[in-house]
Image: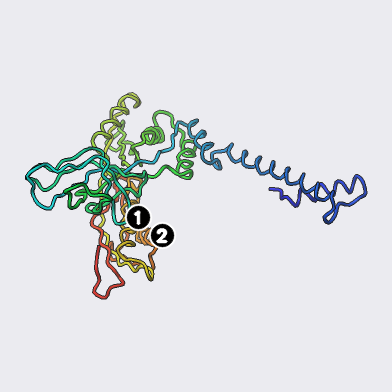
Amino acid sequence: MITLEEIYQGLAGEFQNQTGRTAGGSSELAVRFYAVAAQLYSLYVQGEWVRRQCFPQTAQGEALDQHAQLRGVTRRQAAKAAGTVRFYVDQPRQGDTPVAAGTVCMTAAGVRFVTEADGTVPAGALFCDAPVTAVQAGGEGNAEANTVVYMALPPVGIAACANPEALRGGQDAESDEALRERVLDTYRRLANGANNAFYAQTAMSFPEVAAVTVLPKNRGVGTVDLVVAAQEGAPGQALLDKLQAHFDRVREIACDVKVLAPAVEAAELELTLWPQEGRDFEAVAQAVRARLTGWFTGERLGQSLLRAQLTSLVFAVDGVANCAFSRPAQDLALDRMTLPGLGQLTILNGGEAAGGEV
């Protein structure tokens, strides 16, 4: 694109050609030319921005959303993680111990969750469960089991809390690059109501679906199998039934369509972590755990598990000086119908002689 200096030189040169006079230095004429050049340059910049918004390859933000709408694609919105937190009393009590809706609990990394309904530890019992939702939407709200163990203001009589199961469902808003790829894919693979692109794009139009594998003739001629994954990983039966009912309505005549859940290959991860000097190991390890946990989503359907990729994820966490994976011992090659899942995750402290773990 043309520069401000080039515009100024063009104005000054044309003035000299027409009048035989020069506008040099800090003369009033030169200042006027610079002022005009600056205004023209701003128009060039704005025009270039408008040009970029005209094409899905370069559009951004709202303009890209509009391109997506023309192709029947909608940006995926951020979602909050949710699940259950268990609240404990130190010993059985004669009366009920209430846990009010709005009680805030959190992880060591400060990820906060709030109870969505009142709970009560009954008389004679030691705990009660209450539904919780992350305060902030996004993938960082996902939490492993037994990591939500702090309370901002403990209810009267409540001694401790913990999440017996992982809190899932949190996802970031779809980035421009991810949305752009889906939009461009509708041009590269034009759906015609019967080809792979039709089935893939129809499945991906459901916001709950993170990835899909289309398997034509998987059970013989006239059959199409769809292996789908949800954002949190393996889809629930309700989502499978919803997709099955939809494809039963829109499938081509005499085509047997079946919606399937992927096989899940759980990977056991073990790594040694060296935090940067002056950084707390526990805090860094929790951040690493959150990063690795958040990576294992349904978007990984059909992708192999590469040690180099896992190492890169860990090094991207603030406070990590070095790391070394001992498990898996090698890359895990997966087929198109398999989803990599996270099994046991062990993080050893490389800064301790005896080696601790979290």
- On the image, which quarter does residue 282 sit in? bottom left
Residue 155 screen position, x and y as percent: 21, 47
Going 48% across and 45% down the picture, which residue do you hit?
Answer: 177
Residue 335 screen position, x and y as percent: 31, 49
> Given the image, on which type of amino acid does mark 1 rest?
Arg
**Closer-to-camera residue (280/232):** 280
> What colour scheme governs how the chains and residues are painted in the rendered image of this protein?
rainbow
Q: Is residue 109 left or right of residue 160?
A: right
> Given the image, on which type of amino acid does mark 2 rest?
Ala
Q: How many marks?
A: 2
Residue 122 numbered mark, or none: none
Q: Is residue 48 left or right of residue 102?
A: right
Q: Which secondary structure, mark 1?
A: helix
Residue 291 numbered mark, or none: 1
Going 27% across and 66% down the picture, which residue do you hit?
Answer: 348
- Sequence-wise, which precedes: disc 2 or disc 1? 1
Above/below status of 273 relative to 237: below
Residues at discs 2 and 1 in contact (Cβ within 8 Å): yes
State the residue position of label 2.
316
Query: How far apart are labels 2 and 1 at the CA level?
Result: 9 Å
